[in-house]
Amino acid sequence: MPMFRFTTYLLWLTYIISASVTAATLTVDVTDAQGNMLSDSVVELISTAPLEATSTSEITLPATAHYEMRQQDRVFYPFVLAVPQGANVDFPNLDRTRHHVYSFSEAKQFELKLYVGTTADPITFDKAGLVAIGCNIHDYMQAFIYVAKSPYFSVSDASGEIQLTDVPPGEYQVKIWHPWQIVAPASSSIILNDGANQLALSVDIEHQNKPSSPPSGFGASDHASHMMGQHAK
Ligand SMILES: [Cu+2]
């Protein structure tokens, strides 16, 4: 009996301690090798402590979250989208030109044949990994969907900054990815404490221009017209 009580007491103590733990936030500043702020980098935190891993798996996907890879002015937006594994992503076409969105990536192969407006069903990204998105009509159109294993991930903004909030304190493996990286950066590890945490990361990239729509009448839309046997716009 006393043993039982002691165990119960310990369980309660553990419960109280874990319940009192406040969430960590992490601010990551991402730069290239020259120190320039780098947007469109994905940072993902993967728990390396078994206890945290359990709690991570219990965290359900933000099912209500709406993920979207739109086509506007014959460009995909956003250029880099990060979603949790299992997310549904819509591909609305805001152009009057039809697009033919596809991916041949191992993490997800799909094809949305020539369409205008919103496709009927979203595409489900059920496998973690990287999905390169293209358009069959407009070769220069390109975007990436990073399907994260962990619920703790984000994409760096124009100032190269990433904010991760409500992360359980603990030890994490830090993965970083950028579409123009020269080699896959080695992952690092971090111990997140209650409250604010800071991290600076850099990725060696080969600078490129983000896909942008060519001047009206150039190549792409003419090509589309031929493909469809009619004027797209
Ligand atoms: Cu297109």
Image: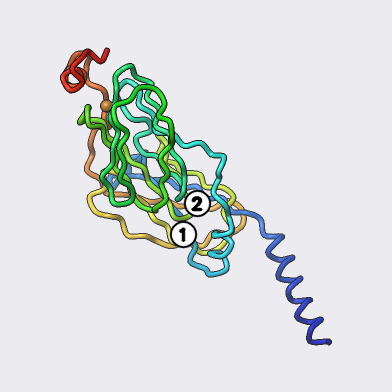
Q: Which mark is residue 160?
A: none
Residue 56 falls in image quadrant: bottom right
Q: How far from the left and from the top, in percent, is residue 100?
A: 28, 30
Q: Amino acid at mark 2?
A: Tyr
Residue 166 spot, x, y in % from top left? 59, 50
What residue is disc 1 on?
A: 46
Regarding residue 154, the answer to whether it shows in the image is: yes
Q: Quadrant of the C terminus?
A: top left
- Image position of 186 with respect to 144: above or below: below
Quadrant of the drawing holding the N terminus: bottom right
For the residue labelled by badge 2, is the local secondary structure a helix, a strand or a loop? Answer: strand
Helix, strand or loop under label 1: strand
Residue 152 circle label: 2
Q: Is mark 2 within 8 Å of ligand 1?
A: no
In front of the other: 91 or 28:
91
Which residue type carries mark 1? Ile
Which of 216/173 is in front?
A: 216
Looking at the image, tell me whether mark 2 or mark 1 is earlier in sequence order: 1
| Label 2, label 1: how far apart the Cα atoms are | 7 Å
